[in-house]
Amino acid sequence: MVLSDIDIRRYMEQGKIRVSPDLPPEQFGSCSVDFRLGAEFSIFEHSRHAYIDPREKSAIQDLMRTIVVPDGEPFILQPREFALAITMETLELDDDVLGRLEGRSSLGRIGIIVHGTAGLFDPGWRGKATLELSNLGIMPVALYPGMRICSFTFEQLTTPTSVPYYKKAGNKYAGQTSPLASRLVAEVSKNPSGR
């Protein structure tokens, strides 16, 4: 069951969905809440590294450079460029609520994809959302920290999960506060055959 704006507000009052800082009224939709773009981005240093090897022991994060955009200035996403970003808001979900991150249509219409995959936020999620930004268009696009960048919808599970995300032994992104690169290396190293 997807929660309406009325249910989202009720869940927030009950502490089942926690967002900080508090959301102003204009960030609520009929069945979603908008999150804003943070000021920190990570981009691949493709001029220094020939390719990404998921079996390489060095962390993928080491192939990236962090950029912090000063107040009032834009991050320019070039055509065919990929960048990781972070939301301003922190999200915490109860053990029986899941979240889904969606791109905004207004940005999609100018070629900006907010996430290519990984739009599901498990029950028990705690942290900021890393955004997988891509520019599919032919023109650079200015993205400003503080602008509404994505929306979250929420669903009620039939029962609380037995192992919420923050308690999973293998959780890789719980509590993130900056745009973390893929931690695929650990998975591939443990199981090189892919089975």
Image (tube, helix red, strand yellow):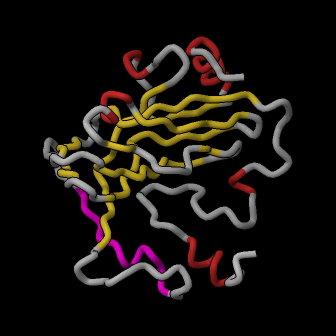
Is 52 part of what is drawn in magenta? no
Name which residue lies at 16% across and 48% down.
Answer: 140
- Report whether 29 appears left or right of 156: left
Q: Is residue 164 above or below residue 193?
A: above
Q: Nearer the viewer, residue 147 or 54?
A: 54
Q: Position of residue 74 (x, y in %)?
A: 16, 46
Residue 95 screen position, x and y as percent: 75, 40
What is the span of residues highlighted in magenta in the rendered image? 58-68
Query: With respect to residue 35, does 123 lie above or below?
Result: below
Quarter of the figure with residue 145: top left
Q: At which x and y percent is residue 24? A: 39, 21
Q: Is residue 184 left or right of residue 14?
A: left
Which quadrant does the C terminus fall into? bottom right
Q: Is residue 60 magenta?
A: yes
For the point 37% across and 44% down, the residue is 113
Quadrant for residue 5, please give it.
top right
Instruction: Answer above or below: position of 98 versus 84.
Output: above
- Front-most of residues 174 and 115: 115
Q: Residue at x 60, y 56 (%)?
A: 174
Q: Compare residues 118 and 59 and report the one nearer the observer.
A: 118
Give the side of residue 4 with respect to residue 95, left or right: left
In the picture, the quarter occupied by the N terminus is: top right
69 or 3, nearer to the observer: 3
State left or right for residue 27 relative to residue 167: left
